[in-house]
Amino acid sequence: MATDEELIGAVADGDGRALEQLCRRYERGLHQFIFRHTGGRDVDDLYQETWLRVVRAAGRFDRRRRFSTWLFQIAVNLCRDWHRRPPPEPVDPAGIEDATRDGTARGDAALDARRLLAALPEAQRSVVILRYYHDLDEDAVAEILGCPRGTVKSRLHHAMARLAELARP
């Protein structure tokens, strides 16, 4: 089985099958990352744009790096740009309650987790999602976000404090 780095090299040479393999490998993780980062809005558009940028920049990929790190850096940058856009039109909270009312605590918990993540500043949200939702170590998170490991630790600390504050009744 080819490594991710070999596959992205093949993508740079125009191999569509190599791109399909990469997409299959990262479909779930990348989709979940974007979903959590945006609160479920514009996920498909950002997912598709991430892969378009991968294809366009495949020839410039440094094969000494890990492909997964590079892929998530692209997704993080797109999510940052997305957060800078004007906010969408407000949604009627009653409509959200009706749409998510399934009588399970799990649905309520998922909605609450999305609400709490959305309340974090973008830098803290990225760190929390990469560290806890994608189970990446602090060094990998630092590489993806292009910051020192100490910054990742600080952002995690502040994010957890903020989440605890927000979660209090």
Image (cartoon, helix red, strand yellow):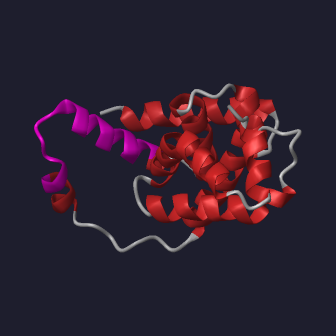
Magenta residues, dominant SS class: helix
Please report the residue visible at 53 percent of the width from the left and 44 percent of the height from the top: 24
Report x, y in % for residue 61.
83, 52
Side (left or right) of 40 relative to 154: left
Report x, y in % for residue 74.
69, 55
Vertical arrangement, residue 148 with respect to residue 50, above or below: above
Compare residues 17 and 12 and report the one nearer the observer: 17
Instruction: Determine if residue 69 is in view.
Output: no
Compare residues 5 and 127 and report the one nearer the observer: 5
Q: Quadrant of residue 63?
A: top right
Vertical arrangement, residue 42 with respect to residue 130, above or below: below
Instruction: Determine if residue 135 is in view.
Output: yes
Please report the residue visible at 74 percent of the width from the left and 66 percent of the height from the top: 56
Question: Magenta span has 101?
Answer: yes
Report x, y in % for residue 26.
57, 42
Give the quarter of the figure containing the N terminus: top right
Side (left or right) of 34 relative to 19: left
Report x, y in % for residue 141.
70, 35
Total tally of numbered discs in the picture: 0
Q: Which residues are magenta?
A: 98-117
Please report the residue visible at 76 percent of the width from the left and 51 percent of the height from the top: 10
Question: Magenta span has 113?
Answer: yes
Compare residues 59 and 132 and report the one nearer the observer: 59
